[in-house]
Amino acid sequence: MASASRSFSHALRTATPSLRTTTARSSARFVAPTQNAFRQQRRGYATGKEDHPDKYEGNPTGLIWGAGALLAAAGVYGLYTYKPELFGQTNTRKIFVPRFEDYQKVYDHIAKRLEDQDEYDDGSYGPVVLRLAWHASGTYDKMTNTGGSNGATMRFAPEGDHGANAGLKAARDFLEPVKEAFPWITYSDLWILAGVCAIQEMQGPKIPFRAGRTDRDVSFCTPDGRLPDASKDRSHIRAIFGRMGFDDRAMVALSGAHALGRCHTDRSGYEGPWTFSPTTFTNDYFRLLIEEKWQYKKWNGPKQFEDVKTKSLMMLPTDMELVKDKSFRQYAELYAKDNDAFFKDFSDSVVTLFELGVPFQQPEDQRYVFKSSFD
């Protein structure tokens, strides 16, 4: 289109001087004594003959026809540009719309990195990647419809520096090469997809996934205090999870993520793993919580519990609330006995958590279920 416009402008510039030149030549023919000019005018009138204007060089009629032809050419060029398929060409300007296969490739890339990068903690980045997805989502407030996984605002301070998010830079850095390999995916979708991948690759349940989260700027960062505080009691648990819309059953199911990973003194201040297999997703967290005897750990750190038998496992004050509270305990006991029931409730609850506040275009019944390396 730009080329056609330049051609049209060139034609105008070329035609206009021609008209001026013609006028100049015509004026030159009449530069003569006044009497001669008058006689020529009389002779011209007496003959009754007039030269047809089309005979003069640079007349406007030819210019209009030329301009029309150029405009027509510009129209054809524009049509070719925006509808090349009409001319047997392929439109190279189509916007890339990722499909299930594209997200599966991202999943596979993350799974491969989880397998290869086995030097972290107990041999896997999986637990900290899941924690990143959990904490990115757990800031949601249903009353104000703020926070949640839509935005990936933990990329910015102060949210990235909140005490509850200490140590999560390791997970964000771990996923940066994946973002570079698949630049079309948003950080918001990437972090959640990575959490899904971590659960499944650590032999957890299938977690259906919907895409469509967008990245937001620093103005959307949430205030500190929206994530659970491990030193608190049952009222705090209900306040934090209730703000997101969860009931007691879902609160206990989501707490089962503590089957994975460990605490670090340089992050939360606490120390130790919850289970003997911190990189395998099972109901062991609930089984140990119910079956083992626990006592206060004698050390200089914050209040936490250790198992009496081996003194190698730990539980947080909020963990112990799940067996002290009658409503919470019924679900903890259910999950300790029935791993399938735990997997089902955890999957349902974490899907809800990961989707809070996201204005999806993809329908709920069209969520993606990714193949894991175990399938």
Image (tube, rainbow, N blue to C red):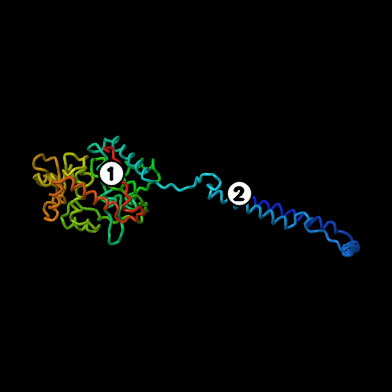
Q: Which residue is mark 2?
A: 3
Instruction: Identify the element where label 2 is drawn.
Output: helix
Pick the front one: 151 or 210 = 210
Name which of mark 1 and mark 2 comes first in the sequence. Answer: 2
Indicate the position of residue 109 as horizontal and vertical percent values: 34, 39
- For the C terminus, give its image quadrant: top left
| Structural crowding at the residue carrying mark 1, measured as other residues with C-alpha within 10 Å and reported as few (<14), some (14–19) or many (≥20) | many
* 166 sits to left or right of 297: right
Indicate the position of residue 263 as horizontal and vertical percent values: 20, 44
Q: Nearer the viewer, mark 1 or mark 2?
A: 2
Q: Which residue is mark 1?
A: 129
* 201 sits to left or right of 217: left
Pick the front one: 153 or 352 = 352
Indicate the position of residue 300 as horizontal and vertical percent values: 14, 45
Q: Residue at x 86, y 58 (%)?
A: 31
Q: Do residues under tags 1 and 2 come within 8 Å of each other at their CB atoms?
A: no
Q: Which circle marks residue 159 in the picture? A: none
The quadrant where residue 125 appears: top left
The quadrant where residue 182 appears: top left
Q: Residue at x 80, y 58 (%)?
A: 52
Q: How many marks?
A: 2
Instruction: Identify the element where label 1 is drawn.
Output: helix
Q: Amino acid at mark 2?
A: Ser
Q: Amino acid at mark 1?
A: Val
| Structural crowding at the residue carrying mark 2, measured as other residues with C-alpha within 10 Å and reported as few (<14), some (14–19) or many (≥20) | few
Q: CA distance from mark 1 to mark 2?
A: 52 Å
Q: Residue at x 20, y 40 (%)?
A: 278
